[in-house]
Amino acid sequence: MSDILDMTLASLAAALKEKKISVAEVAGACLDRMEATEPRLRAMLHVDREGALAQARAMDAKGPEAEKPLWGVPVTVKDALVTRGMPSTAASKILEGFQSMYDAYAVQRLREAGAVILGKNNMDEFAMGSTTENSAYQTTHNPWNLGRVPGGSSGGSACSVAAGQCFASLGSDTGGSIRQPASFCGCVGIKPTYGRVSRYGLIAYGSSLDQIGPMARSVEDCARVLSVIAGHDGRDSTCSPDPVPCYEAGLAQASLKGRRIGMPREYFGEGLSDGVRKAIDGVAACARQEGAELVELSLPHSEAAIATYYIVAMAEASSNLARFDGVRYGHRTADPKDLQELYTLSRKEGFGDEVKRRILLGTYVLSSGYYDAYYRKAAQVRRLIRDELRQALAGVDCLLAPVSPVAAWPIGQHAQDPLQLFLMDAYTCPVNLAGLPSLAMPAALDGDGMPVGFQLIGREFGEADLFQMGAAFERALPGIGSPSL
Ligand code: GLN
C-alpha cells in the first residue's frame, strides 16, 4: 500500500486538517487502489470516481473545516443503504438501476461530517447470506486469499476496508453481517445496540434485528465513525434518544486491568474449529496477562439461537419484501397478461433463489395454523435468550467469544447447502436477538494465513466500554498486518 493508504483514519483526518495532504490526493489514492484491485476483488457495485474527485477538489478549494470529524476521509457504503446520486440495489436484480431520492440517515451523517463517499459495496442480496456469493451481480473475493469468501453479508465493505480501498465502510448486521466479514477479512467492525443508529434508509431485512454499524482498520477508527452515525432520528421510531458519548475519548489510556470477562461455555463446544479455538485461547491468555479476570459461565439457551433467529428473520423478511411488487419501483416484468401476473413474474424474475426461499419460509411460519407453533414460539424463545444474555452481562464487563466457528472457506464450498451456512451464525445471531452491541476485531492468523476474529459482547448501550476494552486488546495483541495484494 502507498503511504497514504497505510495511515489510520484518525491520523489521516489530522493530516488533512493540517493541509499536509489534500482531499483530492487522498481520494485519488483510494480510487487508484480500487482500479488496481477491483478486477481481482470485486468489492464494489458502483464507484463514483468523477463525483468523488469533484467533491474532493471543491473541499480543497474551500479549505479544512476543523469541526468535521471525517473531513476529507474516503469511505464506502454497503449497497443496502440508500444514497442520493448513486444506485442502491441491495445487490438484487429487482432494484437494478434504482436511484434513491434521499440519503439514509447514517449516510447523511457521514456527509455532514465531511466524508467523501466513493461508492457502494457488494453484499449478499438483501443481506441474506454469509459469503457475498448471493449477490445478483458478482462474487467478492477475500483479499487475504482470492480463492476464499470474504464473509457476508457485508463482504464488500469488509473487503474494501481490508484492501485499502477506503478508510471505513458502513455495513449492516442482522445476524452477524458486520462481525463475520470483519473477522474473515481481518478488520474491526461493531454491531451497535439496537436503536443506537437510525435504520432510516436501510433497505430492510429483519427490522427487529437490523443495525447499521461501521467497519474500519482499527478500534479508534470504528469509534470515530460510530460517534458520527449514532444518535436520535425521528424517522426511525426504534431509534434511541439517549445522548451519544464521544467513543474515541480515553482510548489511548484504556486498559484491561480489573475487567471481568465472561467466557460462555456453549461458544467453545463442538463445532468450533481448532484454528479458531487456538486464536481465541491466545486472546484469553492476553486478557489474563493484562490483568483481566476470566469468568467461565453458561448460556444454556444458546443452542436454540439459530432456529429462533431464522424464524424471526425470515418472517420479518417476508413482510418487508412484500413491497417489491413491480408497481412502485424496481423491476417490472415486460409483458404481463393481468395484474396477478405482473406481481408474480416481476418477483420471480427479480429475486434470487435464497431470497425466494426465505420469503416462502417466512410466509409459512406466519400463516394461520403455523403461527403459534413457529413464530409465536420463536418470539418466546427470543425473550429467554435475551434475558439470559443480559443476566450474564450483569456480572461481567463483557463476553469474549469467537465470531465464526471457522475461518473464511473456499468460494463455492457451501453454495449448495444453505442449512450448513445457517449453522455458521451460532455465535453472532444471539446478539441480534438480544439487541446488544458487539465489537469484532482480529485475534490472529490461522495456520493457513487467514484472519480469525473475536467478539466482545457488551451491555445495552455499552459501546463506549467495548471500545475501551477493544483498544486495550488491540495494543496488547501482536496484530495481523494487512493482506499483500
Ligand atoms: N448470515 C445471516 C443470514 O443470512 C446474517 C445476515 C445478516 O446479518 N444480514 O441471515
Image: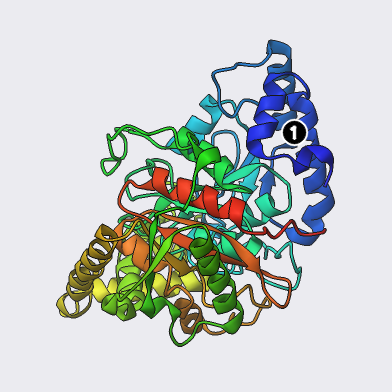
Name above or below for residue 88 compared with residue 287.
above
Residue at (52% x, 72% y) in the render: 404
Name above or below for residue 108 compared with residue 379.
above
Quadrant for the C terminus in the image: bottom right
Residue 232 found in image quarter: top left
Crowd around label 1: few <14 · some 14–19 · many ≥20 (10 Å)? many
Q: Is residue 34 left or right of residue 190?
A: right
Residue 117 visible in image: no
Q: Is residue 148 left or right of residue 285?
A: right
Along the line of sight, the residue nearer the viewer: 312 or 273: 273
Relative image position of residue 287 (x, y in whole percent): 50, 62
Relative image position of residue 145 (x, y in whole percent): 75, 69
Along the line of sight, the residue nearer the viewer: 329 or 207: 207
Q: Is residue 213 left or right of residue 275?
A: left
Residue 166 visible in image: yes
| Residue furthest bottom in the image | 270
Name above or below for residue 328 compared with residue 92.
above
Residue named by callout 1: 27
Residue type, numbered disc 1 = Ala
Residue at (52% x, 77% y) in the render: 405
Relative image position of residue 131 (x, y in whole percent): 58, 69
Residue at (46% x, 83% y) in the render: 419
Residue at (52% x, 40% y) in the render: 253
Q: Is residue 86 left or right of residue 347?
A: right
Residue 457 found in image quarter: bottom left
Along the line of sight, the residue nearer the viewer: 16 or 24: 16
